[in-house]
Amino acid sequence: MNPDLDALKPYPFEKLAALKAGVTPPEGLAHVPLTIGEPQHAPYPAALATLVEHQAEFARYPATAGLPELREAIGGWATRRFGLAGLDPERQVLPVNGTREAIFAFVQAALDRTRPARVAMPNPFYQIYEGATLLAGGEPLYLDCTAESGFRPDFDAVPAKIWREVQILFLCSPGNPTGAVTPLAEFQKLIALADEHDFIIASDECYSELYLDETAPPPGLLEACAALGRHDYRRCLVFHSLSKRSNLPGLRSGFVAGDAELIAPFKRYRTYHGCAMALPVQRASITAWNDEAHVRANRDAYREKFAAVTEILAPVMGFPAPEASFYLWPAVPGGDDEAFTRALYAEEHVSVLPGSYMGRPAADDRMGRPATDDGMGRAGSNGTNPGSGRVRLALVAEVDATVEAARRIRRFIERRG
């Protein structure tokens, strides 16, 4: 077996299951999970109807590049949403089976292990960034997201000699788990940095359509390129999905777009990988990308939940004002996120995710090497994990269940003084 498999850390939900093992929650309280970022709102019905309408096409093999109509729908949506001059559907767009699969596959295709192969990523982070890096023979570079930095990475803290070893920089905006949004100017600063040190920017924007201020949609990496007149999107790729936008996580449909010089070899890799999107799924995706009314209604539903939960929890928990995504990132009283999570489950039958499970101990120097680094970017236990002392609350259930969970969390905190 690939020895790099031994470098993979337990997935956060494995650790959560172990933490809750042996705990018997109150039988009279229904379980409310706020752990997994799986939308529970109704999926976009027109997309499902299209899927059924074209179900006979499951009898045909799909092409890796996807249907021209799908690439055109994606290009049109991205152009409208981010104010682009346009996207070439033949060369700058590639349909994928969700961002998770595409992010993992892209790192395998892009990383050159014959030279220093660091992959920079926000910390805490979506675990696929790290796992994909380790299995591609790379070294994660964890960029801490703390309250002091606005819950975004402090890119200025990375010295030039470390940037020269970076091959891929992962961004996540809006952020998971923090909900922080990368400003347009910061995107542009990073584009200049990528030009200077010759690395790829891979921007995970799967939460981009879940934002609280309808007048201020989060900017994107390609939007920053367009504002610079950089219409070839050189060194830049974005990853988008229908999972959150259209409540279709099981459809496994998304896209990668940007630099045609990166898309072409990635498409070649995917042809061998054998991961083309099924034709009925492509048809359903066209329907979803061409409609915005259901997306606005989805945002309205999340706004209602954020407002209700914030009113309940703000008096007893501190958290950054949410900008986008469907997460809250509160600090826990007492500072022990594991103890808080286990006791909350035991007393109130509410599940949350300890923030430390999504992060790694902080770097012990300005060189970007983690504390007690073992040479593979795997940190020991001497540093400070920027996720410690917080929990992630995924506000994905319907409003009544989410509000009930918030009331139980507040009751739990107040009972403990």
Image: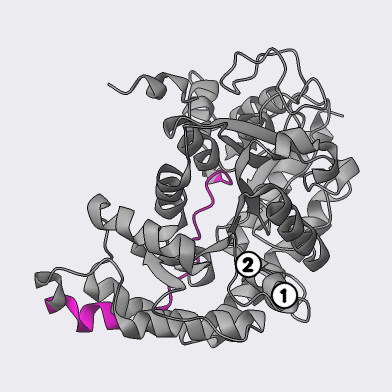
Q: Quadrant of the C terminus?
A: top right
Direction from residue 153 to residue 53 in the image, left or right: left
In the image, residue 210 above or below residue 133: below
Q: Which residue is at a point 71% across and 28% down the rendered structure image?
A: 337
Query: Residue 153, how many percent across, how many down?
Result: 77, 44
Task: Place residue 33 in its image quadrant.
Answer: top right
Q: Secondary structure at mark 2?
A: loop
Task: Residue type at mark 1: give it.
Answer: Pro
Q: Which residue is at a point 73% across and 52% down the rendered structure image?
A: 196
Task: Assess disc 1: are there few (<14), some (14-19) or many (≥20) residues with their C-alpha within 10 Å of its C-alpha.
Answer: some
**Sequence-first disc among 2 and 1:** 2
Query: Residue 332, how many percent across, how many down?
Result: 79, 34
| Labels 2 & 1 near each other (Cβ < 8 A) | yes
Task: Residue type at mark 2: give it.
Answer: Ser
Q: Which residues are magenta?
A: 33-56
Number of marks in the rendered image: 2
Q: Quadrant of the N terminus?
A: top left
Residue that label 2 marks: 208
Query: Residue 22, how many percent across, how many down?
Result: 49, 18
- What's the CA distance linking mark 2 and mark 1? 8 Å
Between residues 374 and 281, which one lies in front from this camera angle?
374
Q: Which residue is at a point 67% across and 56% down the rendered structure image?
A: 403
Residue that label 1 marks: 217
